[in-house]
Every structure is written in structure tokens, then in C-alpha cells.
Image (cartoon, helix red, strand yellow):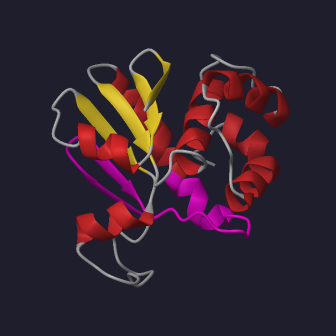
Amino acid sequence: MREIHTNLFVGGDDACASCATKPEFAILHACKSCHQEALAYRSALPPSHPSYLIHENPSHLYLNMVDMPNELLPEYTHPMVKRAMEFIEQNLKTKKVLIHCNFGMSRSPSLGLIYLARTGIIPKSSLEKAAGVFAKLYPRYSPGEGISLYMKRNWDYLMGDLSQ
């Protein structure tokens, strides 16, 4: 687990396990495995399920986000990113926030990068500039092909008004 900005942390499953019961943390789970555990299902939820993409309870946001070689599709990923940015912003006012995925290398640091760029902490003029600065803050950053393609193709959207 590494602090990428004041009270904002990125990590993997080990960080989640160590922070899950600490009341000073709000946790953004950017992984299908935690989404499955929170909603008690095994393989997949039907797309019509109200928590298909996002499930939330006090201090925890669960995203049904997978790391795959294909580009993450905007119709699924945009709502998750939007809610993730809101969750981080809301909780940083009173808590430490951990963004985690399984290995802490792709999805969770990508969400951290997006947040830091959106808030002007790192450059937002291009993904390349933002990623270059972010890699110094979080050397383990190694985005998978799916999240990388999604961010490249949607950078302007990610830096703009996410409600559109």
C-alpha cells in the first residue's frame, strides 16, 4: 500500500485485508472478487441486477471491474469511474481512502491516476504526461491492456464532466 496523495492510498488485496476493519478508512474495491464477496454470488450477476456494476455500503464501494486484454467498454466503465471519483472526493473529507484491486498494479492505480489528474495534482493535458508523473508517485503502476486502452480512448471524457 502506498500513499499517492494526502490520505489517498493505492494497493492490492493485502492492503484491503489490513484496512477492511479500520474505521478511519473508506475502501474503493476495484475488483470483481470483492464485488462477488459483497453480493454473495459466484460467476456473474445478470446485467439487470441493480448492483451489477456498483454496490455500496457505508465506507465501501465495490466495482464489478475486471482486468482484461480487451478495452474496457465505456457503457460499463464510465458509470464505475464516475462513482469512484465521487466516492474518493466525498470520503477524503473525513477519512483515509484506499483504492485497491487484486495486485495493486492496474485498475486501482489507474483510478488513482484519474483522480489526481482530475483534481490538478498531476498534469491532465494528456494521459502520457499524467502517467509519467504518476509512475514516479507509484512505481508499481503497470496498467493492463483493457484499462490502458479505455483510458487512452476516453481521456478527454475522464478529465471532463463525467455526468455526460
Residue 96 falls in image quadrant? top left
Residue drawn at (62%, 22%) of the image: 137
Is 159 located above or below residue 56 in the figure? above
Residue sitting at x 50%, y 54%: 80
Looking at the image, which residue is at 60% across and 55% down?
A: 78
- 63 shown above or below 110: below
Q: Residue at x 43, y 29 (%)?
A: 9
Please name whichever residue, 145 or 44, is drawn nearer the observer in this view of the structure.
145
Is the N terminus in the top left, top right, bottom left or bottom right quadrant?
top left
- Residue 60: horizontal and vertical position, in percent? 28, 46
Report x, y in % for residue 71.
73, 65
Can you give x and y, in whole percent of width and height, for residue 140 in the image?
Answer: 62, 37
Displayed quadrant of residue 159? top right
Q: Quadrant of residue 20?
A: top left
Residue 39 x/y as whole percent: 25, 70
Magenta highlight range: 54-80
In the figure, is residue 80 to the left or right of 45? right
Number of on-image labels: 0
Residue 155 in the magenta stretch? The answer is no
